[in-house]
Amino acid sequence: MSDTPKAIQVPLYELDAPAHQLHFESILNSVPDAMVVTDESGTMLAFSRAAEQLFGYTAAEMIGQPVNLLMAGRDRTNHGNYIGNYLRTGNRQIIGKGRVVIAARADGTVFPIDLKIGEARIGDHFLFTAFIRDLTEQQSAELRMQEMQSELVHFSRLSAVGTMASALAHELNQPLTAVANYLEASRDLLDSPDPEIKEVLRGALAEAATQAVRAGEIVRKLRSYVSRGEVDARPVSLGPLLADAIALTKTSRDRADIPVNIVVADQANRALADPIQVQQVVINLIRNAMDAMTGRTDARIELRVSPDEDPDYVQIEVCDNGPGLSPEIKETLFKPFATTKSQGMGLGLSICQTIVEAHGGIIRAVASPQGGTCFRFTLRRDTGKSEP
């Protein structure tokens, strides 16, 4: 027989209260992410060592204080409403889901965090445990990457515009020159008294009309070529894809505290799409919604994925509670270079439309029942069946 003593395992439920307290303190001292425990009133009951390092407060300073001291912007003002709404309705906005929000350190600096919250019910009371991860370095890297991508896209647009202008100038030069020549000749023939000139004049005008139609056909073909696009569509899970898109919209800290809630129906979670292009559409729509709600303290955005009326498609909605769209704006919404922004190029929604239509879907804007605007677009649903 071996003389080596065997470890004695004691189930956690058999530990006494002091042992439980020691175990809990060891967790607070060793958990790598910042951890904060609050009661249902938002009062902090525990503050981990990682939280002390992240926020610059000591646990002794924080225990008994309202947790919104760690928040910034709208979240600091509205936190009490968030808890009250959850306790009243049971509607989970962040519990068990996670969200990127803006936090505040002891010195007043603000920074982005990934916030995940768990709950425990003890009798008639709730405890909430927040796990907090600093996203400063990650978002800085993403922001720089995004800036580089934006610069590349901007350069590509300018290059495309220049190429298209050059192609149009080259291709249209001949028919437009012919139109001008025929019309000038017709003008000169009008002064002739010869009755036979009428037939010549009719022929010249007919040729001018033919060349004008040819010019229009050249423009149509070029537009079709430019807008056709190429799509690397493959089966994707929309939930993680859209969550990443939301995170990328939070890189601008002046708008990062605008809540973006996402609801994905299980039966609509799979689609056939180019992930990067779909994210580009969603990011553009969310940023437009954020711009439309500048200055609103109750700003909120809903991102919903649901089955479409056509069973072969899924529908994605980006809805805001902003001022809505005027009839004038609706008329030119998806036209290139139409914009209400002083710094905008007016290409964002036009590009969104091109991407969605290249996927075989449609995009439109409708009034939201709660006020504001909903942009809806469709994607082909992934049925799991391979194409023949």
Image (cartoon, helix red, strand yellow):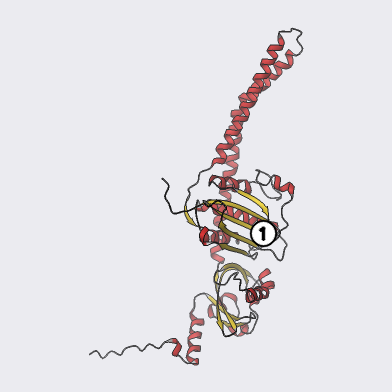
Q: Quadrant location of residue 174? A: top right
SS state under label 1: strand
Looking at the rendered image, the quarter that the N terminus falls into is bottom left
Of 190 and 203, the residue lying toward us: 203
Looking at the rendered image, the quarter that the C terminus falls into is top left
Of 360 and 186, the residue lying toward us: 360
Of 255 and 366, the residue lying toward us: 366
Residue 122: x percent and y percent?
56, 84
Residue 148: x percent and y percent?
56, 53
- Residue wearing tag 1: 320
Residue 181: x percent and y percent?
67, 19
Task: Assess disc 1: are there few (<14), some (14-19) or many (≥20) residues with their C-alpha within 10 Å of its C-alpha.
Answer: many
The answer to whether residue 106 shows anywhere in this view is no
324 lies above or below 201: below
214 lies above or below 52: above
Instruction: Check disc 1 and give the amino acid type.
Output: Asp
At a point 61% along the width and 74% down the height, the residue shown is 90
Of 311 and 368, the residue lying toward us: 311
167 lies above or below 43: above
At a point 45% along the width and 88% down the height, the residue shown is 13
The answer to whether residue 364 shows anywhere in this view is yes
